[in-house]
Image (spheres, helix red, strand yellow):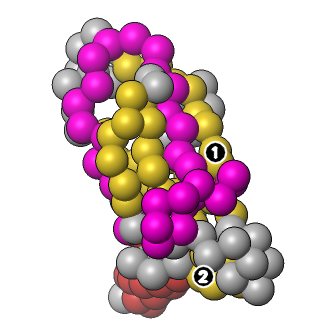
Amino acid sequence: MERYSLKIGLMLLFSGLYLILTVPLLAEESVTTAGASQIVIIYPKQGDIIPGGKNIEMIYQLTKGLKDNGDHIHIYIDGENDGTSKRSPRSLGKLPPGRHVVNVRIANMNHDPVKVEATVEFEVTAGASH
Protein backbone atom coordinates (compact mmCIF):
# COMPACT_ATOMS: atom_id res chain seq x y z
CA MET A 1 0.00 0.00 0.00
CA GLU A 2 2.87 2.38 0.82
CA ARG A 3 4.45 1.72 -2.56
CA TYR A 4 1.16 2.47 -4.29
CA SER A 5 0.75 5.74 -2.34
CA LEU A 6 4.32 6.75 -3.18
CA LYS A 7 3.69 6.13 -6.90
CA ILE A 8 0.49 8.20 -6.80
CA GLY A 9 2.27 10.98 -4.93
CA LEU A 10 5.12 11.07 -7.46
CA MET A 11 2.66 11.08 -10.37
CA LEU A 12 0.81 14.03 -8.85
CA LEU A 13 4.07 15.88 -8.20
CA PHE A 14 5.30 15.44 -11.78
CA SER A 15 1.87 16.31 -13.18
CA GLY A 16 1.90 19.53 -11.16
CA LEU A 17 5.41 20.39 -12.35
CA TYR A 18 4.35 19.74 -15.95
CA LEU A 19 1.43 22.15 -15.60
CA ILE A 20 3.57 24.79 -13.92
CA LEU A 21 6.12 24.60 -16.73
CA THR A 22 3.74 24.41 -19.70
CA VAL A 23 0.68 26.50 -18.82
CA PRO A 24 2.56 29.85 -19.01
CA LEU A 25 3.54 28.98 -22.59
CA LEU A 26 -0.10 28.69 -23.56
CA ALA A 27 -1.29 31.79 -21.73
CA GLU A 28 -3.69 34.02 -23.62
CA GLU A 29 -1.94 37.22 -22.61
CA SER A 30 1.74 37.82 -23.02
CA VAL A 31 4.16 39.36 -20.60
CA THR A 32 4.73 43.11 -20.90
CA THR A 33 8.14 44.66 -20.48
CA ALA A 34 9.40 48.24 -20.44
CA GLY A 35 11.88 47.39 -23.20
CA ALA A 36 11.42 46.22 -26.77
CA SER A 37 9.03 43.44 -27.78
CA GLN A 38 10.35 39.90 -28.16
CA ILE A 39 9.14 36.77 -29.95
CA VAL A 40 10.27 33.17 -29.57
CA ILE A 41 8.88 30.26 -31.60
CA ILE A 42 8.75 27.27 -29.24
CA TYR A 43 7.21 24.76 -31.68
CA PRO A 44 7.93 23.72 -34.32
CA LYS A 45 11.65 23.83 -33.66
CA GLN A 46 14.33 24.49 -36.25
CA GLY A 47 14.90 21.31 -38.28
CA ASP A 48 11.87 19.40 -36.93
CA ILE A 49 10.42 16.63 -39.08
CA ILE A 50 6.64 16.60 -38.71
CA PRO A 51 4.36 13.78 -39.94
CA GLY A 52 2.13 14.85 -42.83
CA GLY A 53 -1.64 14.98 -42.70
CA LYS A 54 -1.75 16.64 -39.28
CA ASN A 55 -2.78 20.13 -38.26
CA ILE A 56 0.36 21.93 -37.06
CA GLU A 57 -0.05 24.07 -33.96
CA MET A 58 2.64 26.74 -33.66
CA ILE A 59 3.48 27.61 -30.05
CA TYR A 60 5.16 30.94 -29.45
CA GLN A 61 5.92 33.33 -26.62
CA LEU A 62 5.24 36.99 -27.36
CA THR A 63 6.57 39.56 -24.91
CA LYS A 64 4.90 42.89 -25.58
CA GLY A 65 7.25 45.83 -25.22
CA LEU A 66 6.22 49.28 -24.08
CA LYS A 67 9.20 50.74 -25.95
CA ASP A 68 7.83 49.77 -29.39
CA ASN A 69 4.17 48.99 -28.51
CA GLY A 70 4.32 45.48 -29.97
CA ASP A 71 0.79 44.08 -29.81
CA HIS A 72 0.48 40.97 -31.99
CA ILE A 73 2.28 38.97 -34.69
CA HIS A 74 1.95 38.68 -38.45
CA ILE A 75 2.61 35.16 -39.74
CA TYR A 76 4.21 34.25 -43.06
CA ILE A 77 4.35 30.65 -44.26
CA ASP A 78 6.79 30.13 -47.13
CA GLY A 79 6.71 33.87 -47.80
CA GLU A 80 2.90 34.07 -47.99
CA ASN A 81 0.91 36.10 -45.47
CA ASP A 82 -1.10 33.76 -43.23
CA GLY A 83 -2.77 36.39 -41.05
CA THR A 84 -2.21 37.58 -37.52
CA SER A 85 -2.30 36.18 -34.01
CA LYS A 86 -2.48 37.43 -30.44
CA ARG A 87 -2.71 34.03 -28.76
CA SER A 88 -0.58 30.92 -28.67
CA PRO A 89 -0.96 28.23 -29.86
CA ARG A 90 -1.90 29.26 -33.38
CA SER A 91 -2.81 26.77 -36.11
CA LEU A 92 -0.71 26.69 -39.26
CA GLY A 93 -3.11 24.17 -40.80
CA LYS A 94 -2.18 20.99 -42.66
CA LEU A 95 0.90 21.89 -44.67
CA PRO A 96 1.87 19.88 -47.77
CA PRO A 97 4.93 17.60 -47.68
CA GLY A 98 8.26 19.35 -48.03
CA ARG A 99 10.35 22.05 -46.37
CA HIS A 100 8.55 25.04 -44.90
CA VAL A 101 9.69 28.36 -43.48
CA VAL A 102 7.54 30.19 -40.94
CA ASN A 103 8.38 33.79 -40.17
CA VAL A 104 6.60 35.77 -37.46
CA ARG A 105 6.89 39.54 -37.20
CA ILE A 106 5.71 41.65 -34.29
CA ALA A 107 3.45 44.58 -35.17
CA ASN A 108 1.79 47.35 -33.17
CA MET A 109 -1.98 47.98 -32.94
CA ASN A 110 -1.85 49.85 -36.29
CA HIS A 111 -0.25 46.75 -37.90
CA ASP A 112 3.04 48.64 -38.37
CA PRO A 113 6.01 46.27 -37.98
CA VAL A 114 8.25 46.94 -34.98
CA LYS A 115 11.27 45.23 -36.65
CA VAL A 116 11.34 42.21 -34.33
CA GLU A 117 10.86 38.78 -35.86
CA ALA A 118 11.63 35.06 -35.57
CA THR A 119 11.95 32.38 -38.23
CA VAL A 120 11.87 28.58 -38.12
CA GLU A 121 12.40 26.04 -40.91
CA PHE A 122 11.06 22.47 -40.68
CA GLU A 123 9.98 19.56 -42.89
CA VAL A 124 6.60 17.89 -43.30
CA THR A 125 6.77 14.24 -44.37
CA ALA A 126 4.63 12.68 -47.10
CA GLY A 127 2.42 10.65 -44.78
CA ALA A 128 1.34 10.28 -41.20
CA SER A 129 3.60 8.14 -39.03
CA HIS A 130 2.25 4.88 -37.59
Q: Where residue 65 sits in the image (x, y, percent)?
A: 68, 77
Image location (x, y in percent) of residue 7: 44, 78
Labels 1 and 2: the sequence-earlier one? 2
In this view, 81 is above or below 126: below
Structural crowding at the residue carrying mark 1, measured as other residues with C-alpha within 10 Å and reported as few (<14), some (14–19) or many (≥20): some
User: Which secondary structure lies at badge 2?
Assistant: strand
Q: Amino acid type of disc 1?
A: Ala
The answer for how far apart the CA atoms under marks 1 and 2 are is 17 Å
Q: Quadrant of the N terminus?
A: bottom left
Residue drawn at x 47%, y 72% is: 109
Give the answer, above or below, for where 58 lies relative to 123. Answer: below
Q: Which residue bears the numbered disc 1?
A: 118
| Residue shown at 64% from the left, 48% from the top | 117
* Prevailing SS of the magenta stretch: strand
Of the pair 3 and 40, the residue shown nearer to us? 40
Q: Quadrant of residue 59?
A: bottom left
Seen at 33% across and 47% down, the residue is 83
From the viewer's perspective, tell me whether residue 129 is left or right of residue 65: left
Q: Which residue is mark 2?
A: 31
Q: Nearer the viewer, residue 32 or 49?
A: 32
Q: Residue at x 46, y 25 (%)?
A: 79
Residue segment shown in magenta: 87-116
Q: Is residue 130 visible?
A: no
Contact? badges 1 and 2 (CB < 8 Å): no
